[in-house]
Image (spheres, rainbow, N blue to C red):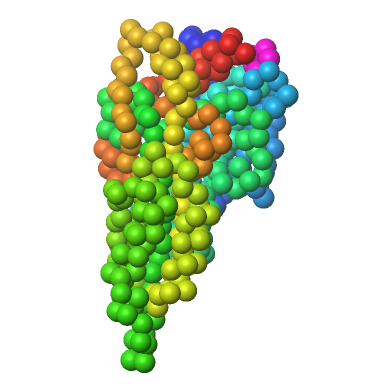
């Protein structure tokens, strides 16, 4: 089976139309209403069965008996777009390229449905809502923010997975290139507010200022991570300040629970009001899946180039999945500009939108052979 074969001309045209529709339906986290309608229409057009989970926010397509087959593989695609500042408010745009992931996932679903799956191997395709940290652009969104894959994990939709595969568009990368990444850092965001000044408050000044809080916060985080180097970015917001603390992927064992405990402890001793915005675990790509991916990619050596990267900027909720299951996400070229920037876009549709379907298919085939 080859997506670029002559028997797939109509499929390729349909998938490029799908990409356009998804791109113009850019929606915020947990409000991916038009996006899931496009998924639903595409799947019923091709009579592909789907289940809707997370109260209808998340489509799940099963090919084979997931969890019962010799090998069970999950493929994820994010559904939400990014809120971009515009005038007084924000508007959604697909500046992280998530619409492309939907095309990869639905293209794979269509090929599996048309040409059949693999013996002994079950495939589960999950459309995941709310990957982006919505409170970053939507300050009214209720806290703490739990990203989509944390909900999906909690509800057991990854349970039984032997491998989790995903794709993502890369920042400014030529056509014919992919990025093999070791991982991405985790992130914890907190929002601080200052109550009005109380002259009778006798606590030391370090307990009554943002700077004092920041120092205590860093001290506590360093204690549990025993890491001298932590990246903390401060971002002023209307009524206070946000602190974003990055965790290198080596610190994967820093649990959300530990952060919660620190917040409770600090909140009792400081005058600063603290709210947890969200936390994302570091992404640790599976070594054996990475090797497998490299093997699969090298079969296409003639026109494919691999760029190796240690750590990507930014965090993803796939990090949470990678703490429990073997995960590999491939970053795809054929793009211009940097994700989350207004100018980011695809320059080679064939490569960025269609080629990854073939890669996913080849990966699953390789996993099936080795089962
Ligand atoms: Zn993204």
Q: Which residues are magenta?
A: 115-121
Apparent side of residue 64 relative to residue 135 in the rendered image (left or right) = right
- When asked about the image quadrant of residue 364, the answer is top right
Asked if the stretch drawn in magenta spans residue 118, the answer is: yes
* Residue in the image at 50% along x and 35% along y: 322
Asked if the stretch drawn in magenta spans residue 62, the answer is: no
Q: Nearer the viewer, residue 190 or 340?
A: 190
Q: How many marks?
A: 0
Image height of 5 relative to 237, above or below: above
Whole-percent x, y for residue 219 in the image: 34, 60
* Residue in the image at 65% along x and 38% along y: 157
Image height of 292 relative to 28, above or below: above
Apparent side of residue 204 relative to residue 16 in the rendered image (left or right) = left
- When asked about the image quadrant of residue 316, the answer is top left
Please say whether residue 93 is visible from this viewpoint: no
* Residue in the image at 44% along x and 37% along y: 283
Quadrant in the picture for the N terminus? top right
Please say whether residue 301 is visible from this viewpoint: yes
- When asked about the image quadrant of residue 152, the answer is top right
Whole-percent x, y for residue 228 in the image: 29, 49
Label the magenta part by its dominant secondary structure: loop
Image height of 72 relative to 271, above or below: above
Instruction: Return the residue found at the far bottom.
Output: 200
Quadrant in the picture for the C terminus? top right
Q: Nearer the viewer, residue 250 or 73?
A: 250
Whole-percent x, y for residue 41 in the image: 61, 36
Image height of 156 relative to 272, above or below: above
Whole-percent x, y for residue 215 in the image: 31, 64
* Residue in the image at 32% along x and 65% along y: 214
Q: Nearer the viewer, residue 10 or 315?
A: 315
């Amino acid at each position: 089976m080859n997506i670029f074969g002559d028997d797939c001309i109509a499929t390729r045209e349909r998938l490029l139309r799908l990409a356009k529709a998804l791109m113009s339906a850019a929606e915020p986290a947990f409000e991916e209403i038009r996006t899931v309608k496009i998924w639903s229409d595409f799947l019923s057009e091709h009579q592909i069965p789907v289940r809707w989970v997370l109260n209808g926010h998340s489509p799940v397509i099963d090919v084979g008996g997931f969890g019962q087959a010799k090998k069970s593989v999950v493929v994820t695609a994010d559904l939400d777009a990014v809120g971009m500042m515009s005038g007084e408010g924000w508007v959604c745009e697909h500046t992280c390229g998530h619409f492309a992931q939907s095309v990869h996932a639905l293209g794979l679903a269509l090929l599996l449905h048309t040409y059949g799956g693999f013996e002994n191997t079950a495939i589960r395709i999950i459309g995941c809502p709310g990957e982006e940290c919505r409170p970053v652009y939507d300050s009214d969104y209720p806290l703490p923010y739990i990203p989509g894959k944390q909900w999906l994990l909690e509800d057991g939709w990854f349970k039984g997975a032997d491998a989790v595969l995903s794709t993502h568009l890369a920042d400014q990368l030529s056509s014919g290139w992919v990025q093999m990444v070791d991982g991405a850092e985790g992130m914890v965001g907190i929002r601080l507010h200052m109550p009005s000044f109380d002259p009778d408050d006798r606590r030391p000044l370090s307990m009554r200022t943002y700077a004092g809080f920041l120092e205590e916060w860093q001290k506590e985080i360093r204690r549990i991570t025993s890491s001298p180097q932590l990246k903390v970015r401060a971002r002023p917001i209307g009524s206070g300040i946000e602190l974003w603390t990055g965790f290198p992927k080596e610190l994967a064992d820093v649990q959300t629970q530990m952060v919660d405990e620190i917040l409770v402890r600090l909140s009792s001793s400081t005058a600063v009001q603290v709210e947890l915005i969200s936390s994302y675990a570091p992404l640790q790509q599976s070594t054996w899946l990475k090797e497998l991916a490299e093997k699969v990619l090298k079969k296409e050596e003639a026109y494919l180039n691999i760029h190796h990267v240690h750590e990507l900027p930014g965090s993803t909720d796939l990090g949470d999945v990678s703490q429990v299951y073997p995960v590999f996400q491939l970053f795809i070229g054929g793009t211009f500009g940097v994700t989350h920037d207004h100018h980011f876009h695809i320059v080679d549709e064939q490569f960025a939108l269609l080629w990854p379907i073939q890669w996913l298919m080849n990966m699953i085939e390789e996993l099936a052979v080795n089962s």
